[in-house]
Image (tube, grey):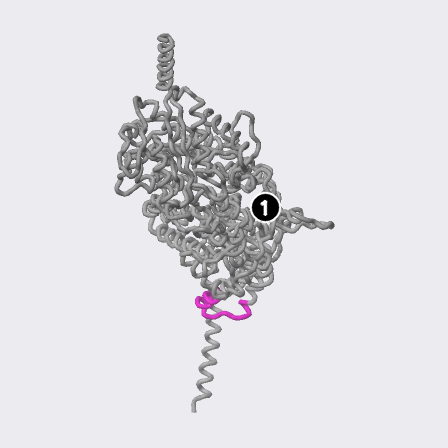
Amino acid sequence: MGDTKRLFFRLLLAAQLCLSSTQVLRIGGIFETRESELVSMDELAFKFAVNNINRNKSLMPNTTLTYDIQRINLFDGFEASRRVCDQLALGVVAVFGPSHSSSVSAVQSICNALEVPHIQTRWKHPSVDNKDTFFINLYPEYTAIARAILDVVTFFKWRKLTVVYEDGTGLMRLQELIKAPAKFNLKIKIRQLTPGNQDARPLLKELKKDKEFFILFDCSYRMASELLKQLSSMGMMTEYYHFFFTTLDLFALDLEPFRYSGVNMTGFRLLNVDDPRVASTMDKWAMERLQGPKQESGLLDGIMTTDAALMYDAVFMVAVASQRATQMTVSSLQCHRHKPWRFGPRFMNLFKEAQWDGLTGHIVLNKTDGLRRDFDLDIISLKEDGTSRVIVEGGSPLTKRWIKIAVWNSYRGMNLTEKSKRENNNNVTDSLANRTLIVTTILENPYVMQRKSDKELIGNDRYEGYCLDLLKELSNILGFTYEVRLVGDGKYGAQNDKGEWNGMVRELIDHVADLAVAPLTITYVREKVIDFSKPFMTLGISILYRKPNGTNPGVFSFLNPLSPDIWMYVLLACTGVSCVLFVIARFTPYEWYNPHQCNPSSTLIQNNFTLLNSFWFGVGALMRQGSELMPKALSTRIVGGIWWFFTLIIISSYTANLAAFLTVERMDAPIDSADDLAKQTRIEYGAVRDGSTMTFFKKSKISTYEKMWAFMSSRKNTALVKNNREGITRVLTTDYAMLMESTSIEYISQRNCNLTQIGGLIDSKGYGVGTPIGSPYRDKVTIAILQLQEEGKLHMMKEKWWRGNGCPEEDNKEASALGVENIGGIFIVLAAGLVLSVFVAIGEFIYKARKNADIEECVSFSSRMEELGMSLQCYKGIRRRSRPHSEARTACVLCQSKRTAKREGSRRDSSP
């Protein structure tokens, strides 16, 4: 009997020891259920965590974790209070949930009174009085989320943003962003989704009409899933839009329908999916979920949401804190007694001091308020090539849909990942491969022309030209396909007085086209509404006008090599030098000599440099013929030498220019520059209506160009033309000058020899490929254009399309023989000189005769005619001198006596 009692006591002691070594901890969970789901995701994660902890005895080797779950309806704060009192009566170390704010406040007040930790995994605005000492929230702190949102917006360098929020709590999370315009150059529009209505298409239609391409959505993942479907139905899931969702569950949504949309989408991810341990846990979760009831639509099959991961980590935090707690007993608490749990403050401190590497990263709580202020957020973005359903064995399926472009830390800010840097440096063909782009263009020779063919052409084969070759080269480099469409209104794109655009620019603004490959000029006003690539051609504005009629050299064109002023100066110089030579020759004694060399004693001296001889010396040197007069004195030789040097330069310059003026056909152009156009009104001038050239003159502040625009705007119906073809026709048929790009003028003048470019370039600009603003294609097209430029293909394409047959009458013009019309003036001068010499000779003869008459006082007419006849009949240059003075004197006396006798006879007859 005694042995039996001893054995019984030993068994009882062993049972007590066994019971004392295995402790049971109970936690309570209050979860709200929706009509669309049988069991909430939080409840499933709660049970999943408890089961994993109990399976893994390394974390709690001597403790078994149990739970009590209560389900309530949404917005039922009274029911939540009653259920939490029931759980506290059972004895729990912590209470999880509920999620709605009204129920949370009721549960929190009871937990504060009884000093039981209340653990939350949803966003909750902290209390104003900060009296929730037993409140713990593993959801990232809201002010840090607000800073993360602002950092992402500034990272993308957005200047215009539309914020769409679901409820009032969104404005609290976005407070840092709302205050940003005061610090950053950012324009923000704030819109709210209609409460209780998931149809956001009216709002989205308005955003699309206002061309809001950067939109931030602050909403739940359920609403985000509906928004994505509606965005797709509205045609907004394109590469021109960038959507930023603040929900932490964006990665969990099923984006398969938007696989090839090319849309830009950015979001946050709290789960550390790069950790193999986290990936393994998520795989186990997925396996259980796939075997259970089907999840709500919109989520990927078997995916773990952020709320579920936070609940999982919160349960593990309880396990970590309880492991450090020794000799802690859990007692039943009554709500109506207000007797707190005596181990509550101690367990609360252990919970705040606990650290854990969970599914949502490293968990560290603030010891003051129990909030999670230190955390990492992955900035994730959709891959440019869309989502993929392929899952590599042993890898996470999430990496096939999203790329992590950066990691944001609540203390260190944003840090780009190496993977995103590599993605940015990838080949430019990655995002354009296998995409079909709509290309708008305009018919303009030689850029885009209708292809001539006997067969009916369809598609892109209908067109040819420089821009089509450029588009083909870009397609080969970037890997995209394209569809060419002519702009509807046939205009390049200009802004009217109301600020509205037309032409190709309008189609890019409205996203009717993806690219504009045409002679589209890069201008300041266009750059504000669309994006341009680097220019593929550089040019400027110039004047297209009819080639002026050629004027043949006149008969006196031999005078043209020197201007009239120079001829006058040469004549004055010759006269001045002759006078100076005459004066110096008279002044110097070395120019006087004895004319009678045989009579040295003669007092008569002579100077050859008379005024007439001095002028003859100057003319002889100017004509490069010289004279019989040579200076003897040093001073006169200096004058002669300087004059010879002067005539050498003058005659050489004249001779050098004479051939050009006699053989080249001179062009008589009425205008030579834009200034000449502005100063006159006889020649009408203009540009293509609504083109960049018109815009240049319209916006210019230079007085000359302002005057030209005033002229064009006053005659809009006639000065401005619809296109270049109409302008060229007007230049050929009327007195009209066309202002257009120099490259177009070069092409036209190569094919029409009646047209030419007048003056130089008025400005400098370039043609670029246009894209909608914010388009992801702009940088890739720019890189491709630079590649074509370095390879010389742009130059070869221009040579191909610009080279024409030329103008053979000018290019192949050979030197022709000079005719009478070229040098006829020389014969006129010769004839005039001969006639002048005859009259001078007659004058000299008469003058000499008169002089002899004054000496002889009487000369018979017959004797003078006899002397003239002898001069003309003398062939040998020798004749007899006139009769001696004695004979002449006798004859004169006889003549005089006869005249005297006649006068006396006449007097007698007249006297009375």
**Is residue 622 visible to us here?**
no
Location of residue 861 in the rendering, given as x and y in whole percent from the top left corner: 53, 70
Q: Quadrant of the N terminus?
A: top left
Q: Amino acid at mark 1?
A: Cys
Horizontally, is 376 left or right of 502 in the view? left
**Secondary structure, magenta segment, majority class:** helix
In terms of depth relative to the viewer, which is nearer, 313 or 573? 313
Location of residue 479 in the rendering, given as x and y in whole percent from the top left corner: 59, 37
Q: Which of the 4 quarters of the picture holds residue 490?
A: bottom right
Task: Give the SS element for disc 1.
Answer: helix
Asked if the magenta segment contains residue 85, the reply would be no
**Is residue 415 visible to us here?**
yes
In terms of depth relative to the viewer, which is nearer, 897 or 758? 758
The correct choice, above or below, for 157 with respect to 850 in the image is above
The correct choice, above or below, for 748 with respect to 852 in the image is above
- Stretch in magenta: 848-864
Please tell me which residue is depicted at 50% across the width and 47% down the height of the picture: 772
Q: Which of the 4 quarters of the picture holds residue 386?
A: top right
In terms of depth relative to the viewer, which is nearer, 610 or 340? 340
Please tell me which residue is depicted at 45% across the width and 61% down the height of the picture: 497
The correct choice, above or below, for 756 with respect to 426 in the image is below
The correct choice, above or below, for 182 with respect to 61 in the image is below
Residue at mark 1 = 467
- In the rendered image, the residue lying farthest to the bottom is 912
- In the rendered image, the residue lying farthest to the front is 1
Horizontally, is 276 left or right of 3 in the view? right
Location of residue 210 in the rendering, given as x and y in whole percent from the top left corner: 46, 54
